[in-house]
């Protein structure tokens, strides 16, 4: 039976994009796999027009690559890709943390606390997929609390890559230490200390970078 997409206010191309991106992030479509338009369209129960729009967007965001005589192929995420990703992310995450410490509301801080509590609970229960998603949600929430819409728009395309990288390199043995670092960052935001928040964010990204590169074989 086709994995059809239900009715929603989102455009069909957006729904196809989200479905395919999730499958790439979760490894259902591994690096190097060729994605055949006809098969995907039949499987999702959509025409090729929204499918092509979604695949073009995934290509722009680095999830797919076009290869001669093969068409769309799931892009690799190797050490060099991770290096480029972290070079950008370190600066933007530090800025987001600094701004969040200046502008976060009490309700926003409570939201971070709830996310962190859920992450710890998921890690302790051994739910890796949920833990990975919540870790990414924590970083995205800090960007939202920055109060800077331009920064939010700049970070949005990196969100999927962050989740994919976490999925490729994380394990439950690294999740609880990450929760400790998130708690320190949250404490700096609560204390309205932008300099400390920015430095902790930089250190956190640097530590994640070192671990990810080891996991990816560098």
Image: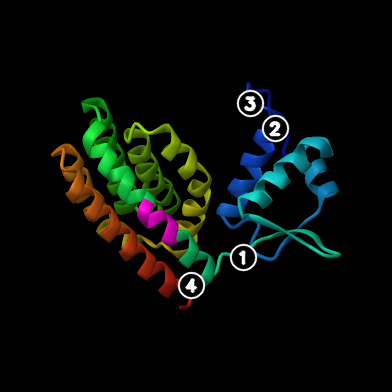
Q: How many other residues sit within 10 Å of disc 4, few (<14), some (14-19) or many (≥20)?
A: some
The answer to whether the residues at label 3 and label 2 have Cβ atoms under 8 Å apart is no
Secondary element at tag 3: loop
- The answer to whether residue 207 is above or below residue 36 is below
- Using the image as rendered, state which of residue 65 and residue 26 is in the foreground: 65
Residue at horizontal 46 percent and vertical 78 percent from the top: 218
Residue 12 x/y as whole percent: 71, 30
Q: Indicate the position of residue 20 as horizontal and vertical percent values.
A: 66, 46
SS for dot 4: loop
In the picture as drawn, the residue positioned furthest to the left comes out as: 191
- Would you call the spot at circle 1 few (<14 residues within 10 Å), some (14-19), or many (20 or more)? some
Upstream in the sequence, badge 3 or badge 1? Answer: 3
Is mark 3 in CB contact (under 8 Å) with mark 1? no
Distance between mark 3 and mark 4 Cα atoms: 35 Å
Ranked by sequence position, the earlier of labels 3 and 4 is: 3
Q: State the residue position of label 1.
A: 76
Q: How far apart are marks 3 and 1 (CA)?
A: 29 Å
Callout 3 crowding tier (Cα within 10 Å): few <14, some 14–19, many ≥20: few
Q: Name the residue under label 2.
A: 5
Residue 94 visible in the current orientation: yes
How many numbered circles does the render carry? Answer: 4
Which range is magenta?
86-91
Q: Earlier in the sequence, mark 4 or mark 2?
A: 2
Q: How far apart are marks 4 and 1 (CA)?
A: 11 Å
Can you tell which of label 4 and label 2 is closer to the viewer? Answer: 4
Dot placed on the residue nearer the N-terminal end, 4 or 1: 1
Q: Could you tell me which residue is drawn at 41 percent across and 62 percent down?
A: 170
| Alpha carbon separation for disc pair 3 and 2 | 11 Å
Going 65% across and 50% down the picture, which residue do you hit? 60
Which residue is under mark 3? 10
């Amino acid at each position: 039976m086709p994995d059809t997409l239900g009715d929603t206010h989102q455009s069909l191309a957006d729904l196809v994009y989200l479905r395919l991106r999730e499958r790439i992030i979760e490894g259902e479509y591994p690096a190097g796999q060729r994605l055949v338009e006809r098969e995907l369209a039949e499987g999702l129960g959509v025409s090729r027009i929204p499918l092509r729009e979604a695949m073009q967007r995934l290509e722009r965001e680095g999830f797919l690559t076009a290869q001669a005589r093969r068409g769309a192929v799931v892009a690799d995420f190797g050490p060099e890709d991770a290096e480029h990703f972290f070079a950008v992310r370190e600066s933007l995450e530090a800025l987001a943390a600094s701004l969040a410490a200046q502008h976060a509301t009490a309700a926003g801080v409570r939201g971070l606390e709830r996310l962190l509590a859920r992450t710890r609970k998921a890690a302790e229960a051994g739910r890796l997929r949920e833990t990975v998603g919540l870790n990414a949600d924590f970083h995205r929430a800090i960007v939202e609390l920055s109060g800077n819409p331009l920064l939010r728009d700049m970070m949005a395309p990196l969100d999927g890559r962050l989740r994919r990288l976490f999925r490729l390199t994380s394990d439950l043995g690294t999740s609880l230490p990450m929760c400790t670092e998130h708690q320190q960052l949250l404490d700096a935001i609560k204390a309205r200390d932008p300099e400390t928040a920015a430095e902790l964010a930089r250190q956190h990204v640097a530590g994640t970078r070192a671990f990810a590169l080891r996991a990816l074989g560098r």
